[in-house]
Image (spheres, rainbow, N blue to C red):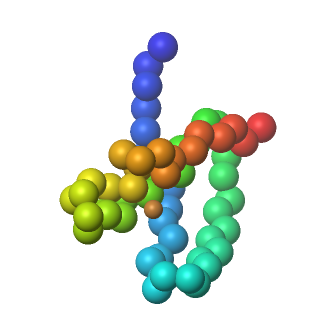
Amino acid sequence: MIAQAAWVGYAALRSGGQTTLAEFDLEPATYAVICFIIDPATGEPHLMNGMVTIFEVA
Ligand SMILES: [Cu+2]
């Protein structure tokens, strides 16, 4: 199995308490949604605290 990754898109940052909706036209595949926002308390991106999810598009 060969692992490949390709950038698909992003959702712009908003102020705390606001919501951003993003729409993508995805081909069938496995995708990951990853948050790279840095937590100022730890200096680590949110993904290090589990803000990441994997999903399939059939
Ligand atoms: Cu986050």
Q: Is residue 13 above or below residue 44?
A: below
* Percent x, y of residue 28: 70, 40
In the image, taking residue 46 as reference, residue 17 lies left or right, namely right
Q: Is residue 7 visible?
A: no
Along the line of sight, the residue nearer the viewer: 34 or 47: 47
* Percent x, y of residue 10: 48, 66
* Percent x, y of residue 11: 51, 71
In the image, taking residue 35 as reference, residue 57 lies left or right, namely right
Q: Is residue 34 above or below residue 37?
A: above
Q: Is residue 19 visible?
A: yes
Q: Residue at x 49, y 82 (%)?
A: 16
Along the line of sight, the residue nearer the viewer: 47 or 32: 47
Q: Is residue 12 above or below residue 2?
A: below
Q: Residue at x 26, y 68 (%)?
A: 40
Q: Residue at x 49, y 62 (%)?
A: 9
Specify the farthest residue to the left: 43
Specify the farthest residue to the top: 1
In the image, taking residue 56 as reference, residue 39 lies left or right, namely left
Q: Quadrant of residue 4?
A: top left
Q: Quadrant of residue 5?
A: top left
Quarter of the C terminus within the rendering: top right
Q: Quadrant of ligand 1?
A: bottom left
Along the line of sight, the residue nearer the viewer: 55 or 58: 55
